[in-house]
Each structure stands twice: as structure tokens, then as C-alpha cells.
């Protein structure tokens, strides 16, 4: 009798395996939801408007989101260390004005202007880091102050006027310089006549930052700083240097985005960069939902920027009113965050 009882195992619930499979399926769908939605958008827009799937249009979408993706990648790095850079849009806009001023007023060429503008962005990132790390100013307040500072500073050299050939300076003299044709190639030319140079730059930034953040010790320390700064410091890492690195990268990438805009537009427009901050932040936050990472990640940011670009381009081709675009971007962001955080419990629970 005893042997019969010992050999008889308690019956397993019949639906245990079913719940487990459903949980695995739900997690898989949640991880790939952004890619599924992106594929659905591509198919839907292509069906409704065949011209949408034209290679030229797809390249124009990537070209349109390149700057947002580059800036969003910078935001992602600052989010990784537990910070937030609100000054990226202003840095990009100031870089547009700086590049234009360097060529049209100072008469510099491409090979002098590009490093100068990138150094300008890195310097602003360094100042942000000094305020945050050394002076203990909260990151939102420090970068918000820098945003206002740069927004006003970029207008002073030209008395609030846009910069173009023949600009009349505040002292009454006329600028004699012009945009270097080689500089304009950055924003207007294509590799092999197919892939815009700005898209190539976006890809290079994405690959470089993906390797840095996901495949190196520095990347692990960046995320460790954002997760638990005290523990990271006690482990022997310099959190001050890591935060400084993050904000310098963010500022440099914002300047790179400004260079692309200046090369595409061909003038220093005082209104450039108006929506870049919100678009870059949206791309970075949508990226939290990509592959279910629920944390800042460069791949997710690029996918988020492309997702919004595809959505807006498709709506434009379908003649949707322009004033609905901000609503659509907001709805996408709300949906992405709900997808990321609102489904945190497993199905079986």
C-alpha cells in the first residue's frame, strides 16, 4: 500500500502548459510589437498608396528621420546614466547658425567648419556635465537653462536675422562668404545615387553607439550608473567621468545633426530645430518598447524614429491634415509606453 502511494505523483494541472505557452507568446508579441506594427504600417500604406513603397520615397523617409535619430541617440546615452538632455534641440539649432556663420562670415571651408562645430557641441556637453556633476544642478534644470541660453545666444551675432550669402551684419558690413559646395554634399548628396549621406551618418552613429553601450565595459558602466549610481561608485567606477562622457556625446551628436540640417537647407535659419527636441525624445522613449528592453537602447531609438517617420509620411501621402501630426506622434508615444509598462505582469499571474 505504501509503495503504491509513493509511486503515485500528484496530477499536474491540465492547463499549466497552456498558460506557460500563452505567457511565452505574450512576451514574444510584446517584445516584437513595434516591429509588427511597423510592418503593418508599411503594408497598409503601400496598399492604400502604391507610391509609398517606391525606393525613392523610402529613402526620403530615412533622410527625414536621420537628424531626429542622431539626436535621439544622444538623448539615449544621457538616459542611460539616469540623466536627461533638454538642450539638444538648441545645440542643433545653434550648430546650424554656427556652421553658416563660419562659412559665410568667416569664409571657412568644410574641413575647418565641421570640426569647429562638432567641438562647439562637445563644449556645450562639457558645460552641461560641469553644471550637473560638479555643481550638483539637477539635469533637467541645467539643460533647460542651457536650452534658453543657446536659443538667445544664436541670435546675437546676426541681430536675429537668418544667415545667407550677402548677410548684412549688425555693424553695417556685408558678409562676402558662401556655403562650401563640399559642405552641401553632406545634406544633399547620396551614396551610389541611392542612399543619402545623412542616412549613412545615422547608420554609422547607430552602429558606433550600439557597440559602445551594448558590447563594451564602458557601456555596462553607463547603465550601471543610471541604475544605481552609489553602487557603481563603490565598485570603483568614476560616475562623474561616465556622466561627463554621456553629455559630451549628446552635445556632439546634436551638433552633427545641426551640420546635416545646415547642409540640407543651405542657410542659417533662426527657426531651425524647433521640433527636434520633442521628436528626439519621442524616438528615445518609443525605443523602450523595442524588443521588450524597457530601458534606453540605441537600436530602439533608431527604430522609434523610423516608426514615427513612416507613420507621418504615410499620413501625408494619404492627404491627412497636417495639424493632426502632433496628435499622432503623441498617440504613438502613449501607446509605446503603455505597451512597455502596462503589460509588465505575465499572463499567468
Image: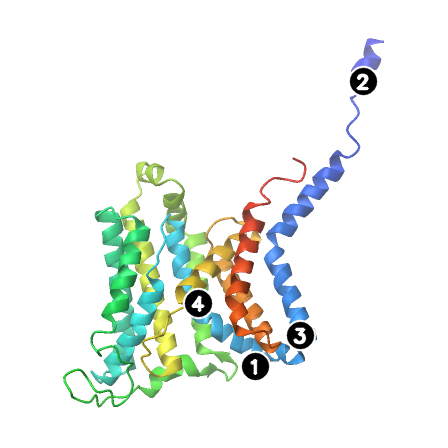
Residue 124 pos. (x, y %): 26, 62
- Identify the residue at horizontal 42%, vertical 54% (top origin): 213
Mark 4 nearby-residue class (10 Å; few <14, some 14–19, many ≥20):
many
Mark 2 nearby-residue class (10 Å; few <14, some 14–19, many ≥20):
few
Q: Which of marks 1 and 4 is nearer the N terminus?
A: 1
Which residue has dot 1 on it? 56
Which part of the image, by quadrant, shows the C terminus?
top right
Which residue has dot 2 on it? 7
Q: How far apart are marks 1 and 2 (CA)?
A: 70 Å
Q: Distance between the residues labelled 1 and 4?
A: 19 Å
Q: Which of marks 3 and 2 is in front?
A: 3
Whether residue 255 is situated above or below residue 227 in the rendered picture = below
CB-based contact (under 8 Å), mark 1 and mark 2: no
Q: Earlier in the sequence, mark 3 or mark 2?
A: 2
Q: Nearer the viewer, mark 1 or mark 2?
A: 1
Q: Give SS at disc 1.
A: helix
Which residue has dot 4 on it? 68
Which residue has dot 3 on it? 46
Q: Give SS at disc 4.
A: helix
Q: Distance between the residues labelled 3 and 1?
A: 13 Å
Amino acid at each position: 500500500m505504501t509503495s503504491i502511494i509513493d509511486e503515485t505523483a500528484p496530477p499536474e494541472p491540465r492547463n499549466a502548459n497552456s498558460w506557460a505557452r500563452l505567457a511565452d507568446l505574450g512576451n514574444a508579441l510584446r517584445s516584437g510589437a513595434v516591429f509588427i506594427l511597423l510592418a503593418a504600417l508599411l503594408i497598409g500604406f503601400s496598399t492604400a498608396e502604391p507610391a509609398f513603397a517606391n525606393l525613392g520615397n523610402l529613402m526620403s523617409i530615412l533622410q527625414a528621420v536621420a537628424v531626429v535619430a542622431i539626436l535621439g541617440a544622444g538623448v539615449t546615452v544621457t538616459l542611460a546614466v539616469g540623466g536627461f538632455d533638454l538642450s539638444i534641440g538648441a545645440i542643433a539649432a545653434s550648430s546650424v547658425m554656427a556652421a553658416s556663420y563660419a562659412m559665410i562670415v568667416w569664409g571657412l571651408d568644410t574641413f575647418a567648419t565641421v570640426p569647429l562645430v562638432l567641438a562647439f557641441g562637445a563644449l556645450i556637453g562639457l558645460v552641461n556635465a560641469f553644471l550637473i556633476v560638479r555643481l550638483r544642478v539637477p539635469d533637467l534644470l541645467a539643460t533647460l537653462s542651457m536650452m534658453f541660453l543657446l536659443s538667445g545666444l544664436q541670435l546675437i551675432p546676426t541681430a536675429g536675422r537668418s544667415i545667407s550669402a550677402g548677410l548684412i551684419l549688425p555693424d553695417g558690413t556685408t558678409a562676402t562668404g558662401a556655403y562650401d559646395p563640399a559642405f552641401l554634399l553632406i545634406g544633399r548628396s547620396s551614396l551610389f545615387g541611392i542612399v543619402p549621406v545623412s542616412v549613412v551618418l545615422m547608420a554609422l552613429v547607430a552602429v558606433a553607439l550600439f557597440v559602445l553601450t551594448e558590447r563594451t565595459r564602458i557601456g555596462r558602466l553607463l547603465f550601471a550608473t543610471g541604475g544605481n549610481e552609489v553602487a557603481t561608485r563603490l565598485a570603483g567606477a568614476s560616475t562623474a567621468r561616465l556622466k561627463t562622457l554621456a553629455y559630451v556625446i549628446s552635445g556632439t551628436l546634436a551638433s552633427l545633426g545641426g551640420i546635416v540640417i545646415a547642409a540640407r537647407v543651405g542657410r542659417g535659419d533662426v527657426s531651425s530645430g524647433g521640433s527636434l527636441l520633442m521628436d528626439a525624445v519621442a524616438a528615445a522613449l518609443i525605443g523602450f518598447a523595442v524588443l521588450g528592453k524597457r530601458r534606453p537602447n540605441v537600436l530602439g531609438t533608431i527604430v522609434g524614429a523610423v516608426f514615427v517617420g513612416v507613420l507621418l509620411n504615410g499620413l501625408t501621402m494619404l492627404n491627412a491634415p497636417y495639424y493632426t501630426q502632433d496628435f499622432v506622434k503623441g498617440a504613438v508615444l502613449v501607446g509605446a509606453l503603455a505597451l512597455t509598462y502596462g503589460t509588465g505582469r505575465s499572463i499567468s499571474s
